[in-house]
Every structure is written in structure tokens, then in C-alpha cells.
Amino acid sequence: MNKDLIAGVVILYNPGEDLTGNILSYSGQVNKLLVFDNTEGETSSTIEKIKTIDNAIYFAENRNLGVG
């Protein structure tokens, strides 16, 4: 087991156009990045942006769960 595994967490709510650039600015500092999207409704454009980040894992319920 690798004890040097570092994970990060980011909480989204209606992210802007700069989403990918913002996440890329710190995703290289962790092994895995857990992205929780609290945006209510349609999130397909966010999903497509997150898919371009190799170490990101995306979670969404299409509602605001109050996480964060």
C-alpha cells in the first residue's frame, strides 16, 4: 500500500467558465481529486470539463446537498 497517496476535494456550485483552469492549477499536487458538484439541474458541460482531468473523480446528485 502506498502511504504517499494524497487526495484532494473540491466542492462545486454553479462553476464558471474558468473551472478547468482553476482545477488544473492544483490537481497536479494530488494523486486523486474528488470533485463534488452541488449544482442543481443540468451539469453535462461540467462533466465534460472534468473528464479532461486525468486524476479527477466526479460526483453529482444534481441538487445542493449542502456539502461544504
Image: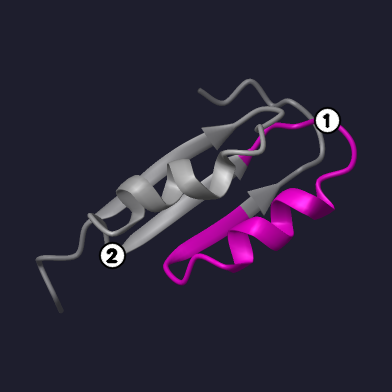
- The x, y position of residue 54, in whole percent, is 46, 72
Q: Residue at x 53, y 34 (%)?
A: 11
Q: Is residue 49 above or below residue 15?
A: below
- The x, y position of residue 30, in whole percent, is 26, 57
> Mark 1 is on which residue type?
Glu
- The x, y position of residue 29, in whole percent, is 22, 55
Q: Quadrant of the N terminus?
A: bottom left
Residue where numbered disc 2 is placed: 31
Residue 64 figure quarter: top right
> Mark 2 is on which residue type?
Asn
Residue where numbered disc 1 is placed: 40
Q: Which residue is drawn at 41% across and 53% down?
A: 24
Residue 44, magenta (yes or no)? yes
Q: What segment is highlighted magenta in the picture?
A: 37-58
Residue occupying the far bottom of the picture: 1
Contact between marks 1 and 2 (CB within 8 A): the answer is: no
Q: In this view, does 52 lie above or below 37?
A: below
Q: Residue at x 69, y 26 (%)?
A: 65
Q: What element carries label 2?
A: loop
